[in-house]
Amino acid sequence: MLSAVSYKGGIDNPSSTNSANDPRYMKWLVQELMAHFWVSMALLVPRALAVLTESIASSATVTTSTAAAPSCTSSLITSLCSYPEPGSNFAVAIDSRASCWDYCNAHPPCNFVIFSAGNPNTGTGTCWLYPGETFDATKGSSDCANPSLFAYSQPVCAGGSATTTAGACAATATPSAIASVCGYPVPSDCFNDCIASTGASSCLSQCAEADSCSYVVFNPENSSNSPYASGNCWIYPNGTFDAESVTTCSGDPEQFVYNNLCPKPSPSSSSISSSVMERSSDTGTAGTTPGSTTSAATGSNGTETAGNTAGSTISSENSAPAGLSLTNPLAVGMVILIWQAL
């Protein structure tokens, strides 16, 4: 703190008698005060700006919560020496038995899985899937000293059954064909309605997501001729499946027909519903209660459900702050002083 004894007097420092009535003394005192003020400002402004930056950064936050991959368990049905191998589309190199269970869970329908042991030191092997089939013990043999095939029941996973391939609707995860045929004609607009697909489940999912889709025809284009592997998806926007349009199959069926189990509401019903909600929100009798907030997460079936769904949930808060709030009084004071100085 400044003391008047530092005022020496003289031409520039007048008399040694410190008096508030002496204008030269007062001028000197103001100069000393201002010098100390700017030194203090030089030390405090960086701190104030740091608090200001921290406050702005904290006002826009992003919170991400990603659930871990499903942890699956499965019961050993039996150990085998031989069992019919699945098609090449369903034999996958895998790093462990647990990974094989996870893979089965992620590719429904999978009622059982066989792990073919490979390297005993690393635990790696091959995962055999049999989509849509059930285990048949009569097809296998266990007459050997060292069985290398291990049949497991349908895995039970912490995250539940996977519907990652379902996309728009959970019902598309395990589609059931209404017909297996040959020679059904392509859609009239094949340019837009004929698309590549990873399987019947994906095909039906794309149908459910389309603005208009009545049914689909899945054409397998894989060595197993299976609807659970890659192929071509034909979407029919309207109408119904016409059984009279098929031809006689010379061998196994080449096309699988599925109805759309998750059709979107018609535009007319959607507009009516939205208008009702608008009128309800005007009166405050429907929708959210004034002053309340509702948190919703979009699940794999395309609907909004409160709380978490199986799998991963991501919540984000990245909106601009309504106003700047500084909880540190020092920062507030420094900002005011800087503004006045400018």
Image (spheres, rainbow, N blue to C red):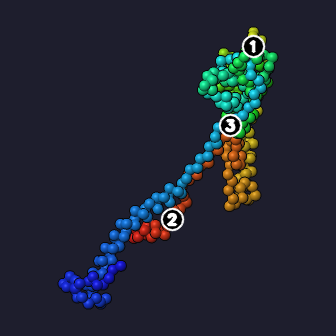
Q: What kind of residue is marked 3?
A: Ser
Disc 3 from disc 1: Cα separation: 38 Å
Q: Are marks 1 and 2 in contact (CB under 8 Å)?
A: no
Between marks 2 and 3 in the image, the one whose residue lies nearer the viewer? 3
Q: What kind of residue is marked 2?
A: Leu
Badge 3 marks a residue whose secondary structure is loop
Residue 99 in percent (x, y) is at: 65, 30
Between marks 1 and 2 in the image, the one whose residue lies nearer the viewer? 2
The quarter holding residue 270 reads top right
Q: Are marks 3 and 1 in contact (CB under 8 Å)?
A: no
Q: Are marks 2 and 3 in contact (CB under 8 Å)?
A: no
Q: Looking at the image, which residue is at 63% across and 21% down?
A: 118
Residue 211 in percent (x, y) is at: 68, 35
Residue pushed farthest top?
250
Badge 1 marks a residue whose secondary structure is loop
Give the class, few, some or many, for how many residues have Cα within 10 Å of label 2's Cα (few <14, many ≥20): some
Q: Which residue is mark 1?
A: 252
Q: What kind of residue is marked 1?
A: Asp
